[in-house]
Image (spheres, helix red, strand yellow):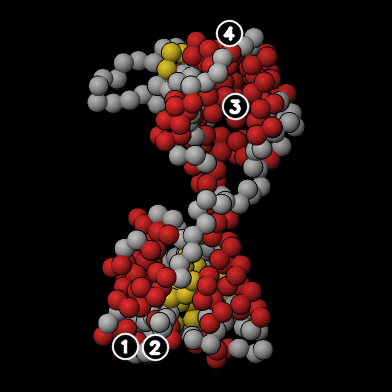
Amino acid sequence: MKYPFEVSFSEILSDPDPFVSAVFSCLESEFLVMPKGMGFVEYDVFEQGYEHLKRVTHGFSDLDVKTVMTAVIEVPIVLIVLRSILGITPPEWGYMTTQRTRTEVTQGYVRSLDRSIRMAPFQALKITPLSARRLEALVGTACQLLGTPIPSVGEERIHRLDKADTGNGIHGVQSLSRVGVPYAMLLYERFLGRPFAGHRDSVSELVGDSLESAIEEVLASAGISYRKTKRAERVRDFDQAPDFIIPSEFSPRIIIEAKITEDDGTARDKVTRVQHLGALSIKGRSPDNPRFEVIACIGGRGFGVRREDMRKLLLATRGKVFTQRTLGQLVECTRLREYRTR
């Protein structure tokens, strides 16, 4: 079996299916394993916050706003526990708070607060007059939501708080904090919410870093000059900065896009991105004389779902598609060999 980067582009054009299968065969996925990253909250830390909140509210029987706010300031992880009981994201909490109070709680503020707490869960919060108003508004909104039975929304819809612990207001939280929780209900809520979904979203960049680091190691080992761009960086002549530019953005000869995804819908978007680079490389030129070579380094099961998407990727890169398993041939089978110094 030959890989697409080992044959001529004309051979790929004549029959792309075998090469689609070749790339599929070496795709690897580790979607069951994720990096913890900075700010990962271990269970014992979370549990301490839970127990502290339970203690100061007398088993969740007294959700006094000032009492809960004091607990949050002294033991900040309490705020993460409170949000987990609600089952919402930081931006959603900020939005609801702004709508329900006269205090504007921006997404930037609530995201920053959430991250700072995860980084230092037991370090007392430094409060300014503005942050005190915002924090009190957040806590007040949470206490109000938990202290009020959920409204009827009809048969065709479901309320986000209609969960085992909050579906009956604070009484449900009290009950589940005192007795064992039905395992089937916990499993059902995990089914609705995807285990580790919030954490996976927060470390999505780190998931891709593993592939980029492997590419950097290949380039450095070969002594090849390269420019690795930063997230959302602006690069001349590119509406979206490529991941790697060889030898530099001032005279791009090779572009490398490193993409990992476990979702086929996201994979399609990433293929479209590479197609755009392919079209940009031949803008005003003959297809046989592109401005720069486009290389795709991919990983994750998302790329192994749609054969048509892989065909598009092969055509856009003229066969230069690599995976973690084939990175060892990255230099010799592309124009990178022209810039090798070791």
- Name which residue lies at 36% across and 57% down: 264
Given residues 127 and 65, the one toward you in this image is 65
- Name which residue lies at 62% across and 40% down: 115
Question: The residue under label 3 is which amino acid type?
Answer: Val
1 and 3 marks in contact (CB < 8 Å): no
In front of the other: label 4 or label 2? 2
Q: CA distance from mark 4 to mark 1?
A: 72 Å
Question: The residue under label 2 is which amino acid type?
Answer: Val
The vertical placement of 79 against 259, above or below, is above
- Name which residue lies at 66% across and 27% down: 47
2 and 1 marks in contact (CB < 8 Å): yes
Residue behind mark 4:
61
Q: Earlier in the sequence, mark 2 or mark 3?
A: 2
Q: Secondary structure at mark 1?
A: helix
Q: CA distance from mark 3 to mark 4?
A: 16 Å
Q: CA distance from mark 2 to mark 3?
A: 56 Å
In front of the other: label 4 or label 1? 1
In front of the other: label 2 or label 3? 2
Question: The residue under label 1 is which amino acid type?
Answer: Glu
Residue behind mark 3:
81
Question: From the image, which quarter does the C terminus lie in?
Answer: bottom right
**For the residue carrying disc 3, how many other residues have a C-alpha within 10 Å: few (<14), some (14-19), or many (20+)?**
many
- Name which residue lies at 46% across and 70% down: 26
Q: Earlier in the sequence, mark 4 or mark 1?
A: 1
4 and 1 marks in contact (CB < 8 Å): no
Q: Earlier in the sequence, mark 3 or mark 4?
A: 4
Q: CA distance from mark 4 to mark 2?
A: 70 Å
Q: CA distance from mark 1 to mark 3?
A: 58 Å
Question: The residue under label 4 is which amino acid type?
Answer: Ser
Question: From the image, which quarter does the N terminus lie in?
Answer: bottom left
